[in-house]
């Protein structure tokens, strides 16, 4: 995340790659962070790998996707494309989305 002093961040991407996934406390901290930032109008991208044992994206989706792009197969090529296209759509239209292969997800965002 980068921004000038006093400016809101342009976007925030949250993934579990640098987090100790065996520590469930990160869910209790990260999910509300994503929800709060999206509520403040900060575009947020949240993702997880296809075969994860930790329900990060489903917890974010449970609160709705306004201001948030979620991807549940971020470790797959289509998941990476979904994140890029979803963030582009979020930044241009303000519409978030749920993408991937799990329940409640669309395979890819609409083409720009």
Image: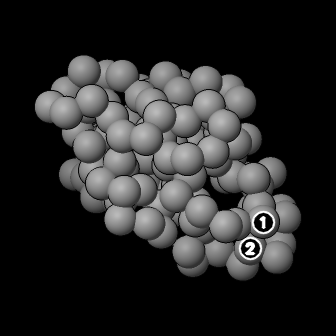
Task: For residue 3, say whether it is visible.
Answer: yes
Q: Residue at x 55, y 36 (%)?
A: 105
Q: Residue at x 68, y 26 (%)?
A: 63
Location of residue 27 by image quarter: bottom right
Asked if 81 appears above or below 96 in the picture, the reply is below
Q: Are marks 1 and 2 in contact (CB under 8 Å)?
A: yes
Kindly report which numbered mark, 1 or 2, lies closer to the viewer in this rendering. Answer: 1
Q: Position of residue 74 (x, y in %)?
A: 47, 61
Which residue is the site of mark 2? 21
Asked if 85 appears above or below 104 in the picture, the reply is below
Closer to the camera in the image, 100 or 37: 100
Horizontally, residue 74 falls left or right of residue 10, namely right
Asked if 33 appears above or below 106 in the picture, the reply is below
Closer to the camera in the image, 83 or 100: 100
Residue 53, numbered label: 1
Horizontally, residue 106 falls left or right of residue 26, namely left
Q: Residue at x 73, y 41 (%)?
A: 59
Q: Position of residue 80 (x, y in %)?
A: 35, 59
- The C terminus appears in which quarter of the rendering? top left
């Amino acid at each position: 995340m980068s921004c000038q002093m006093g400016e809101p961040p342009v976007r925030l991407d949250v993934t579990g790659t640098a987090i100790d996934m065996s520590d469930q406390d990160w869910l209790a901290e990260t999910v509300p962070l994503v929800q709060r930032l999206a509520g403040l109008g900060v575009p947020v991208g949240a993702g997880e790998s296809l075969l994860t044992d930790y329900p990060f994206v489903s917890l974010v989706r449970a609160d709705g996707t306004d201001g948030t792009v979620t991807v549940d197969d971020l470790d797959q090529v289509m998941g990476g494309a979904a994140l890029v296209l979803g963030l582009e759509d979020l930044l241009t239209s303000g519409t978030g989305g749920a993408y991937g292969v799990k329940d409640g997800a669309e395979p890819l965002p609409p083409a720009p």
